[in-house]
Image (tube, rainbow, N blue to C red):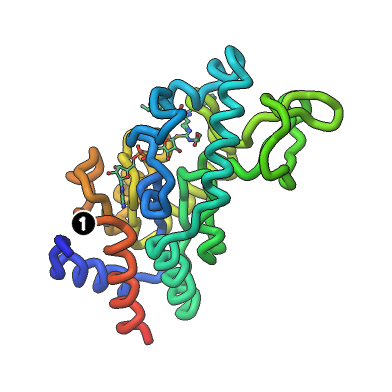
Amino acid sequence: MATGDAQIQRAVAILAGARRVGVLSGAGISAESKIPTFRDAMEGLWKSFDPQELATPEAFARNPERVTRWYDFRRRMCLDARPNPGHLALAELERLMNGCGGWVTILTQNVDGLHQRAGSRDVVELHGSIMTWRCCETGEPFHDLPEAFEQYPPRTPAGTMLRPNVVWFGEALPEEAIDRACEVAASCEVFLTVGTSSVVYPAAGFTHLAREHGATTIEINPTETPASDLVDLSIRAKSGEALPMIVAGVRKVLE
Ligand code: BV8
């Protein structure tokens, strides 16, 4: 693979010497699970729609049918997707660190639930989850959703509108998610940013916060991002390729 072995080995040494690891993940870590990223054009029906235009309360207010159809289409795509070697490697890293009294906390921008399905247990969903929808009037969450909704926008048994339990542009992130993310960024020894364009805030800010608190920062992304010049080690690679190699190296050192 294109990634320099030296970079992989350097990442192994950094992680094997740490016990407190924070991870910021973005849509790129799910790309190898065939879930399109935000900045790649969506496939087929949604190709002509701009996610940033659809992922807003204004779009929902203007056209709840279109927005809920888009989210249900994505929800079913996530249900059909499988965790890829990148997700699985992070779950393995958590087990390795737990085994020596450490921790790995994943701050994910993704709403697809794939980190949890890969076995990661310490996951903070900064932008909520597409797998849960909530009543627009009461905020009551609905977890057991049908395979596909009968109508759009879907409704609760009481007839009120349901929306996906995600954070749209212009909406505040859940307070407890922000609090946990700040805690992780301020206390981790290593902060890995994986598969994110690092343009969406406040999520992208946690890499800066970790660095300000003295963490060693590593980026894994096939392309350059605004974080690339900020981090200590920027690995130009797909997460599904680099992470399994890095975690295999860490396992060799720790076991
Ligand atoms: C808020 C959920 C305030 C919905 C999403 C400064 C501070 C605070 C806010 C702002 C600020 N500046 C601007 C803002 C406003 C805005 C913002 O950041 N705008 C950006 C576009 C400039 N932020 C907000 O609105 C946030 N809210 O701050 O509220 C507030 C406070 C109080 C009261 C009221 C309001 C809310 C932001 C959350 C929006 N919701 N998602 C949904 O999923 O539909 S964001 C959305 O973008 C997704 O979560 C996505 O994950 C996220 C970021 O994108 P990425 O994950 O990075 O994905 P992207 O496609 O961009 O990039 C993919 C990367 O993967 C690429 O780099 C690619 O190279 C790489 N890649 C590809 N293949 C691979 C790979 N990497 C590894 N391996 C591969 N194989």
Q: Quadrant of the N terminus?
A: bottom left
Locate residue 65, reporting x and y percent. Answer: 62, 21
Locate residue 89, reporting x and y percent. Answer: 40, 67
Image quadrant where residue 146 sits: top right
Is 193 placed above or below 138 here? below
Q: Is 180 in front, or is 44?
A: 44
User: Position of 224 compared to 106: left or right?
Assistant: left
Identity of the residue drawn at 20% across and 72% down: 9
| Dot 1: element | strand
Q: Quadrant of the C terminus?
A: bottom left
Question: Where does label 1 land, which residue?
Answer: 235
- Farthest-out residue, top: 62
User: Position of 196 compared to 61: left or right?
Assistant: left
User: Position of 145 compared to 85: left or right?
Assistant: right
Asked whether residue 140 is in view, the answer is yes
Identity of the residue drawn at 24% across and 66% down: 11
